[in-house]
Image: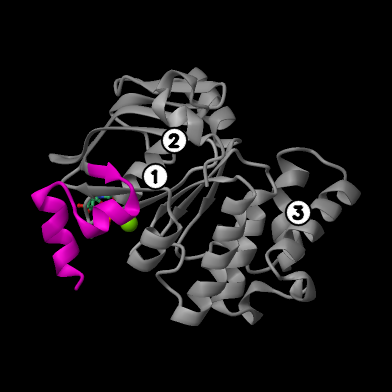
Amino acid sequence: MIVHLFFRGFPELADLVLQASGIAKSFGGNEVLKGLSLDVERGELISMIGPSGCGKSTFLRCLNFLEHPDAGSVRIEDVTVACTGKHWSRANEAEAHKLRSHVGMVFQAFNLFPHRTVLDNVMMAPLQVKKMSRDEAQSIACELLAKVGLAAVKDRYPDSLSGGQKQRAAIARALAMKPSVMLYDEPTSALDPELSEEVLSVMRALDDEGMTQLVVTHDMRFARAASDRVLFVEGGEIVESGDPDLMFANPREGRTRRFLRTLL
Ligand code: ADP
Ligand code: MG
């Protein structure tokens, strides 16, 4: 949900949380990203769709430098990291570290620490990275767990939770660092439909609060109903980007049309 719809017609006034420019990445001779650029406005919920292997995960990972792009730059809030592809210096890594502090990332496989309780999982980054006191970290973690509907299971271990609960815990953990933008890589692909719905409703609630979110998803119903904008990625490029209803009802590009047809 974008609060400042007014800015749509005045791009120079838009409040851009994230600007990625010319992100390129090859693995060996395989050119996976061919210079992707993306501006994300504060409060936007963007769904990224596209066939398997088209580079969606790689792009998300490049946005917070879990993967080093060969070329391009990413600005998030006041931190800019530029890649020349030749040499990744300590200074680059220090900037990338700062940039990551503005990003919350959620993966398909939850990635919770199994030997820690749900509460400890959420408290960990505030304690270790932000050096918060235990009381402060605990109070933030409890508040976030309540927000994602997990207050009652905060002292349990991840293994005893359902997939939907694990993913909501992972979202709470990412939120504990107070990120400016949340990146999700197929957050519901491992979940049954009703458990997916628990996770998607948390994402919708975050959207209502103004969180900025970029979601790689195969859930076309969510992409269409919940997003401000949909990006269709294929062959290492953003083929089409636009209003979800318009794109699903009447895609501009033949490639988008062909992809959407394969889903029917
Ligand atoms: P998607 O998320 O859209 O399914 P990915 O970004 O995971 O696509 O992968 C895009 C392409 O990059 C695939 O061909 C994949 O095999 C390749 N790829 C991804 N990561 C690596 C890696 N670490 N090493 C080599 N190839 C990779
Ligand atoms: Mg992927």
Q: Indicate if the residue with disc 3 has its beta carbon within 8 Å of ligand 2.
A: no
* x and y, in percent, of residue 129 in the image: 70, 39
Give the residue at mark 2. Answer: 40
Q: Amino acid at mark 2?
A: Val
Do tag 2 and tag 1 residues touch (Cβ < 8 Å)?
no
Where does residue 127 sit, x and y in percent of width and height?
Answer: 78, 45
Q: Quadrant of the C terminus?
A: bottom left
Question: Is residue 262 on the magenta stretch?
Answer: yes
- Residue 136, percent from left and from top: 87, 47
> From the Cβ of disc 1, is ligand 1 less than 8 Å away?
yes
- Kindly identify which residue carries mark 1: 60
Q: Is residue 111 left or right of residue 28?
A: right
Is residue 192 shown left or right of residue 113? left
How far is mark 2 from mark 3, CA to CA? 28 Å
In the image, what residue occupies the spot 49% across and 20% down?
Answer: 13
The residue lying at 49 percent from left, 43 percent from top is 44
> What segment carries the magenta color?
240-264
Q: Nearer the viewer, residue 110 or 172?
A: 172
Q: Give residue 123's mark.
A: 3
Q: Are marks 2 and 3 in contact (CB under 8 Å)?
A: no
Vertical order, 176 against 3 (above or below): below
Tag 1: residue type? Leu
Residue 181 on image: x %, y %: 54, 41
Label 2 Cα crowd, 10 Å radius (few <14 / some 14-19 / many 20+): many
User: In this rendering, would 240 be left or right of 12?
Assistant: left
